[in-house]
Image (cartoon, rainbow, N blue to C red):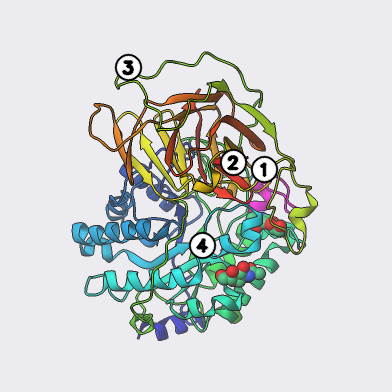
Amino acid sequence: MRFSTSVIAAAGLLSTANAAIKGFNYGANFNNNQAKTLVDFEYEFNAAKTLPGTNGWTSARLYTMIQHGTTNTVIEAIQAAINTKTTLLLGLWASAGQSNFDNEIIALKAAIAQFGTAFTDLVEGISVGSEDLYRITPTGIENMSGAGAQPQELINYVQQTRTAIRGTPLDGKPVGHVDTWTVYVNATNNDFISTLDFLGMDAYPYFQTTMANGVGSASQLFFDAYHQTLGAAQGKPVWVTETGWPVSGQTLNQAVPNADNARIYWEDVTCQLVADNINLWYYTLQDVQLGNPSPSFGIKPAGDLQAVQPLFDLSCPADANPRSSVLLPSATTSSCNCMGSSTSAGLPTTRLSAPAPTFTHTITVTRISSSSVSVPIPVSSSRAPAPVPPPNTPLPAPSSIVPVPMPVPAPSSRRSATPSVPTNISPGLQTPLIPPTLIVTVNKNSGSIIAGNGGTAQLSPFLSPVFAFDIGQEHRGKICNLVFYTPPARPFLDLGPIQIRIPGGIRVSLLSTTTAGLDNGLRVNLGPVDIRLNTGTQLGLSLSITPGNQYNVGSMPCPAGQRVAFQVDSLLGLTVDFFQMTSPPLGLFMVPV
Ligand SMILES: *[C@@H]1O[C@H](CO)[C@@H](O)[C@H](O)[C@H]1NC(C)=O
Ligand SMILES: *[C@@H]1O[C@H](CO)[C@@H](O)[C@H](O)[C@H]1NC(C)=O
């Protein structure tokens, strides 16, 4: 059994400091939402191997098996890992509902079929999910971290993953989960922990703002978290799947981001983990590609990744001694015989109305003027017949969208011990809000669906989300206001549900729907009806979308008993993705009055 070998290593009988896995986290896309391709992944994996003062940083943790922007094509990081002999902690995104998880499994199986053991020999483990349980906690909600998944749902996904790899060369690889340490010490999650082969722990003392979190205390905070996780791990190995100290950004409580402090953190935490032979995927190698995230955790600055020098010294002191107290349960090899911990079969699956994956922790929100500008409404596209309004729905007059600022919560509420979840952010907010039944992001030039039926919407010069609403009969006779909400900017927006990558505005159109195949425009099926893309009646536009606003798009008599659909187009380059959510409101809503 390999575990006994690890115990020996952990006990310090092997002198090599390189026995455990060392790697970095790798998102599927750059900050501007551009997908990383084979050459990008190869470039990053090779750069990690040649960091001055280090050796053996040859593992990659991924967040998804799916190539960014595709439905279920295998992520090109797999080929890059094979080409560069990089080992893999695979990730299956688990916060976007069953249909997205099905696509993760499809891509996983496709990778096994396509690459065989050239791929599977590199796999150190498979993580089902990433911070899904953190995002459903009060803190995760308070920080607007996006949709997560319930423990039972994750138990189902672990079972589905084990079933998918049974009888394949991945059979026997550890199947685990990645989450913040706070999740593992929450006893509600014990049943889920019992289904796992390993616990991937994310811990960032920088964000632990309710505690003394200066860099001098960071090692204490980190290893406290690690020990608490070990204590809750039911004997499973604990791998450090994300940690790091920012090189730039905002000071949080006593935590000052800069390269000097990142060096101190590296020495106190990273070097200690290496000395202790604990598997580690640091966050991160470089996070400033095609964007300017704040905080930034990258050890390399902007520029050609292989050419630029690290921002701080990465060597480890020769005298780092293993601390035996942290070793035994955590040190393990990648080839544990983990098949004993399967979950019971036949559990019901649940569906979350939830976002598709975003794989970076880093965004920049650019504040620009929130004044709306009136511009002429363009006539509808010439490629399709004139728009046909849904029956009984008089056309609203086109207008520019008037933003109404929403109050920003007092800073103190972010640090309260029991964070409150705002349910009614704007005093003037009319409730109830009708959320969309369906959100589908389409390539408006080709009509192909990029992401469908999750809670996520992507906007770029080429990508337009379509929001479909089913308006209940109870709203007959009322006026329905169409409102686009952006939550107030918060210090933690880098983990948040809205990522404004390039500023700009929006234009909202009421789409014509059809049940008959009569037009030559681009059609997308939205359940009971098809919609014709790019043919809508322009309702309103704003040349600037910024956090903390309510954009009143337009009003119409409520189309009671009908499905109506709206296309939102990017103006002036706006590139953003967001998770539609109701508390606080984010995205497009109908507000009946
Ligand atoms: C504990 O875990 C459950 C289930 O994951 C979650 O709903 C709950 O909010 C967590 N409690 C705290 C205080 O984080
Ligand atoms: C989230 O919110 C909590 C409490 O409001 C705060 O202490 C913490 O620093 C925030 N940020 C993160 C990333 O957890």
First reached walking from the N terminus: tag 1 or tag 3: 3
Q: Nearer the viewer, residue 242 or 490?
A: 490
Query: Mark 1, residues whose alpha carbon is within 10 Å: few (<14), some, or many (≥20)?
Result: few
| Amino acid type at image mark 2 | Val
Give the main secondary structure, helix, strand or loop, of the magenta stretch.
Answer: loop
Query: Mark 3, residues whose alpha carbon is within 10 Å: few (<14), some, or many (≥20)?
Result: few
First reached walking from the N terminus: tag 3 or tag 4: 4
> Where residue 96 sits: x, y (%)?
43, 56
Kindly identify which residue carries mark 2.
Answer: 591
Q: In which quarter of the image is the N terminus?
A: bottom left
Report the magenta residues as a range: 249-264
| Ligand 2 found in image quarter | bottom right
SS label for mark 2 = strand
Query: Mark 4, residues whose alpha carbon is within 10 Å: few (<14), some, or many (≥20)?
Result: many
- In the image, is 469 to the left or to the right of 320? left
First reached walking from the N terminus: tag 2 or tag 4: 4
| Amino acid type at image mark 3 | Ser
Marks 1 and 2 in Cβ contact (< 8 Å): yes
Kindly identify which residue carries mark 1.
Answer: 430
Q: Which residue is drawn at 61% across and 18% down?
A: 373
Kindly identify which residue carries mark 4.
Answer: 132
The tag on residue 382 is 3
Dot in front, 2 or 4? 2
First reached walking from the N terminus: tag 2 or tag 3: 3
> Where residue 341 sits: x, y (%)?
39, 82
- In the image, is 75 to the left or to the right of 5? left
